[in-house]
Amino acid sequence: MLTKVGIFFSNPGAKFSPASSASATHFQVSYGMSSRLIYNIRQLVNARMESHLLRGAELNSLPCIDNAWIFIEGDQIADFGPMSELPADLLDRITRSRQNAWGSGTGDTVIDAAGQFVLPAWCDSHTHLVFAGSREEEFVDKIRGLSYAEINARGGGILNSARKLGAASEDSLFNEAWKRLEELRRLGTGAIEIKSGYGLTVEGELKMLRVIKKLKERSSVSIKASFLGAHTYPSEYKDDHAGYIDKIINEMLPVIARERLADYIDVFCEKGFFDAAETETICRAGMSYGLKPKIHANQLNLSGGVQVGVKLGAISVDHLETMDEDTIAVLKNSNTIGTLLPTAAFFLRMPFQPARLLIDAGCAIALASDFNPGSSPSGNMNLVVAMSCIQMKMLPEEAINAATLNGAYAMELGDSLGSLTPGKRANLLFTRPIPSLAYLPYAFGSDLIDKVMIGGEFV
Ligand SMILES: [Zn+2]
């Protein structure tokens, strides 16, 4: 539903005249960069002159401008405001674009977004996007009534993915992951964190991290990599946990650090996997190489993962299906973000994360997809946002903030992504014409994303 009404021919001598409004006085034309003026926007969502991590009640505050324009220079947001305060030079662009119609120009465009809502692109701060093959056979086994333990005994679960990954070439892994990433880009994801953790051998983990590195180099989506060698124990280390942890610390980490393959260290802190003390040991080893912790915590049990994460200054503790008052109190008094993964709880038919308790306590909350072949075979952030409202009683404003701005902070990208803020990267979602913002999570099954812009370019 985007209507490109014309091409603006830039005048090399032009300078923007100061606008009458305070919100539109701080930019000038930078020559040599293409620009885009989007106007008549029904509502510009999460438009902030500055941004910070949102906690508790702040999550409910989503600044929006009705009947708005936004101006993009190169790959960055330059300015925005209401149509009633459109600077004269920008108004002139619209007028001229209507008169000039089409022609060869500088690539500068003027876009009429009548009826559309424009939001920052989603920031998905927790995924396992790189994997070899899907696991729908386990999905059917579960429907037939097999337990998680029985599926594991049949060779299912994470070890199933590890076996498939071991057999896959780096190229085929990359090609599969690229297709998934392209699909997510069209669904509105502009930044994503991707974990290793299906290798569970030195070669396997390195292979995954090299694939993530290649995705980083080739995609316009901003990508962060987490090393999750401590996802589970490979079968040969079933009875030798210390031996596998030693391998992670002394064989995997030094190579990963040398080749700069990861930004974060992650551990699956859970009963039967890595306990709190082991999690701390592995995280501290990662931290000695400059990798900050992002931890899988409290999915199935009160694992102590939140406490370890907060103690180590983790960027985030993720999952949090199982929380008690003490654990919430620890999280709310920290700078660590609680990342909630509702589609994983949905797919596993587990109780959802207690988002309301966490927000009301004053925690900083992000939403992510946990995209992985076993427990969340979807990276669709539109669905994540809808599910957080439907099942976790987050308000649409809270969900959108958690899936954009706080998601960006959960990848340390809050200064450059997650809100429509001058100087930030121009990652924008354009909805189809919808009656209100709440319609997005309400009509959860509809495809409501019309266009996606990443770094100033339409996908
Ligand atoms: Zn995960």
Image (cartoon, rainbow, N blue to C red):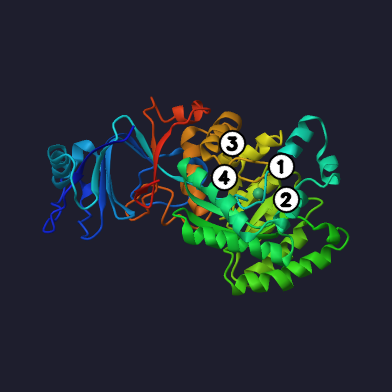
Ligand 1 neighbours mark 2 (CB distance < 8 Å) = no
Q: In this view of the protein, which residue sits in the foreground, 76 or 396?
A: 76
Disc 1 target residue: 135
Which label number is shown at residue 260?
A: none
Mark 3 or mark 2: whose residue is earlier in sequence: 2
Camera-nearest label, 4 or 1: 1
Tag 2 secondary structure = helix
Occupied quadrant, residue 244: bottom right
Looking at the rendered structure, the secondary structure element under dot 1 is loop
Amino acid type at mark 2: Ser
Circle 4 residue: 368
Closer mark to the observer between disc 4 and disc 3 = 4
CA gap, disc 2 and disc 1: 8 Å
Q: Which residue is mark 3?
A: 356
Identify residue type, mark 3.
Answer: Arg
Q: Are marks 2 and 1 in contact (CB under 8 Å)?
A: yes
SS at circle 3 = helix
CA neighbours of label 1 inside 10 A, class few (<14), some (14 to 19), many (20+): some
